[in-house]
Image: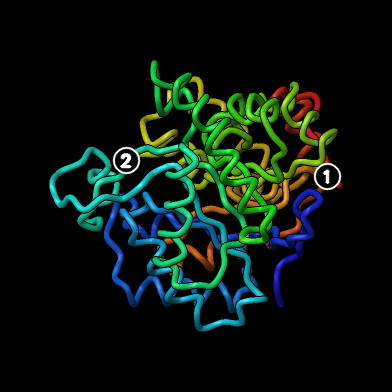
Amino acid sequence: MTFAKRIIGRTGVEVTTFGMGGGPFGNLMAPMANADVASVIDGAWDAGFRYFDTAPVYGFGLSERRVGMALREYPRDDVVISTKVGRLLHPDPTWHPFRTMFPEAGPFRPDYDYSYAGIMRSFEDSQQRLGLDRIDILFMHDISRETHGEAFEGHFQIAMDGGYKAMEELRRNGDVKAIGLGVNEWECCDAAMDHGQWDVFLLAARYTLLEQAPLDSFLPRCEREGVSLVIGAPFNSGILARGAVEGATYGYGAPTAEVFERVKVIEAICRSHGLPIATAALQFPLLHPSVVSVIPGMATLDQLHWNVDRMRQAVPASLWSDLKSAGLLHLNAPQGL
C-alpha cells in the first residue's frame, strides 16, 4: 500500500506525500555499500514510497547511479524520479571541499554551470547515470545567495536566462514533466517566479517546525500561482529527529542556545499528546496545501522503518493549536487540511 499522493501544480505528476531524499546514497557524511543502498530503496518501495529524489553532486554521480540501478527493477510508470541540474561533473580525482561531505565520492569535480548548454548537458549526463529513459522532475540546484555569495547575481542572471530556457524547452518537449529549483532559500524561489513559470520547488530546511518564514509571503504566492513545494531536510539536519539532546545538530552544526530551548518546549508539548517530536516534524509541512511531499534522507532500514512509523502516526489537531498558542508556530500556519 503506497502513501497518499498529491498532484504537482498543473502538471498531472503525482508524488507520494512521503518520498526519499537521495543524499545518503551519495555517501552523505558516511559511506554506504551498494548492497545497503539497494536494500533501503527496496524497503522504501515495500513501505509505499513512489517518489525518489537525487542529484549529480550527491557523491559526484554516485547517488544517481545507485538510485537508477535500484529503481530499474520496478515498473517505470509507477515511480516518480527527480534530479537536479546546475553542476557538471568533470573527471578529477583530486581533493574537493565537497569530499568532506561526501566521503569516497566518485573521481569527479562538480563545477557550477547554469547556462543553456550546461543545463542540457547536465540533464543528458543524469539520464545516462540513472540509466532510465526519462526524468520526471528537474530541479535547478543550489542557485542561491547562500551558496554563491558575491557571485550570486551573475549566476542567477545566467540561470534565469539560459538555464530557464533550457528547462522550459525540456518540459515543452516532454523530456521532463515538471521543473523547479532545489535550494535552501525560499527567497531565490520567490525571485525566480518573476522570471518564468515553475511547477514545483524543493525547499530544504526552510519550512519546518523551527522555521516558517515562508508563510509570510512566499507560500501564499505559491498558492495563488499554483506552484507546489517538496520539503527536504524536515528535521533541520537532526535536532527535530533526536530532540534537544547533547550532540544534536541544526544546519549541520551545533544549535544555538535559543534553538535548543525552543526545541525542548516543542518536545514537551508533543509528549503531552503522546507523540515524539519527529512525528510532528515530518507531518507539519504537509498541512499546507501547497506542499506535496516530504523527503528526508534515510541511510539504513532501521531509519526507514523509524520514519515510516512516525509518518503513519495519527496527529490530533490540538497539537498544532497548542504549539501555536505557545507561540511556537507562525500565526498563519495551517492546523489541518
SS at circle 1: helix
SS at circle 2: strand
Circle 2 residue:
111
| Residue shown at the point (48%, 55%) measured from the top left | 123
The amino acid beneath tag 2 is Asp
The quarter of the displayed image where residue 250 is located: top left
The amino acid beneath tag 1 is Ala
> Quick one: which residue is furthest to the left in this view?
94
The answer to whether residue 213 is visible is yes
Q: Position of residue 71 (x, y in %)?
A: 51, 75
Q: How many marks?
A: 2
| Residue shown at the point (32%, 40%) measured from the top left | 111
Near mark 2 (Cα within 10 A), the count class, few <14, some 14-19 or many ≥20, is few
Near mark 1 (Cα within 10 A), the count class, few <14, some 14-19 or many ≥20, is few
The quarter of the displayed image where residue 59 is located: bottom left
Q: Position of residue 75 (x, y in %)?
A: 61, 82
Circle 1 residue:
317
